[in-house]
Amino acid sequence: MTRTMNQSDDVALSDDFTKGFINTEIETGEGFHYFESGNGKFSMWFPEGYKLEDVPSYVSKDSYESINLYKKAEDGVQKLIKMTYYIGNDPGQVEGNFSVLLNDYGFEDNYEEKDTDQTHIYSGNSFVELIENRAEPKAPTAEKPANQYFALIKDQHSDQHVKFSYEIHCEVNCSINSPEESSFFDTIIRNINFKE
């Protein structure tokens, strides 16, 4: 398997907390590691160059897990992934969590649906701008490309689901490679799988 960086230089493998979730024996696509959640309920492809925030941001319970991944700022760009795993008996929980994502990151209820062999995915993106200290999601344009991506990934055979957001924060004006960021986001959300 080819990697884009020397694995020993990757913070995901050198950070004591993060590497406890990584299994380097299982193959993934280039630029990713195999990650298994602390509660053992889901796995995903974990991006190289990212690390997990430790406690108190990390919370793991049998029916809930909250994790934040971040990439150290490069060229004035900070990248953050927020994920929350849920399973419960509340039939409205999936719809409620997706509604929160749409409210926080979506614009005009714009999203798309897609399926993998194991999951059903609701996803979208937006350009989020701070206006008077309030985040305002808008339609991305060539001049203002998407800087927020969101998804709800639901198991096709249970109520297990993950609420997922990917945020790109620029200190000043920065260049965002939309095709690259969109592909990165899509690769991660398509490779989140649930365990029985």
Image (cartoon, grey):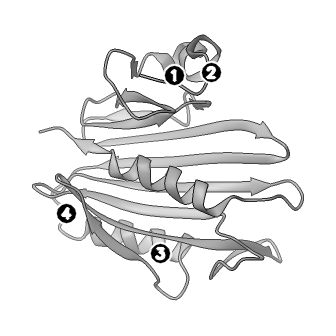
Give the percent coordinates (x, y) of residue 50: 59, 32
**Pointer 1 residue:** 18
**Pointer 3 residue:** 102
* First of labels 4, 1 by sequence position: 1
Give the percent coordinates (x, y) of residue 43: 31, 35
* First of labels 4, 3 by sequence position: 4
Nearest to the observer: residue 83 or residue 183: 183
Give the quadrant of residue 23: top left
Given the image, on which type of amino acid does mark 2 rest?
Val
Please name which of the two marks, 4 or 3, marks the residue nearer to the observer: 3
**Pointer 2 residue:** 11
Given the image, on which type of amino acid does mark 1 rest?
Thr
Given the image, on which type of amino acid does mark 4 rest?
Asp
Please name which of the two marks, 3 or 2, marks the residue nearer to the observer: 2
Give the percent coordinates (x, y) of residue 7: 56, 16
The label on residue 68 is none
Quadrant where the N terminus lies? top left
Q: In the displayed structure, would residue 17 be above or below residue 43?
A: above
Give the percent coordinates (x, y) of residue 36: 33, 28
Please name which of the two marks, 1 or 2, marks the residue nearer to the observer: 2
What distance separates the C-alpha of mark 4 from that of mark 3? 20 Å
What distance separates the C-alpha of mark 3 from that of mark 1? 29 Å
The residue sitting at 48% across, 17% down in the picture is 19
The residue sitting at 23% across, 71% down in the picture is 92
* First of labels 2, 4 by sequence position: 2
Q: In the displayed structure, would residue 169 be above or below residue 142?
A: above
What distance separates the C-alpha of mark 1 from that of mark 2? 8 Å
Give the quadrant of residue 133: bottom right
What distance separates the C-alpha of mark 4 from that of mark 1? 31 Å
Q: Tell me whether circle 2 and circle 4 mark residues in contact (CB < 8 Å).
A: no
The label on residue 90 is 4
Given the image, on which type of amino acid does mark 3 rest?
Leu
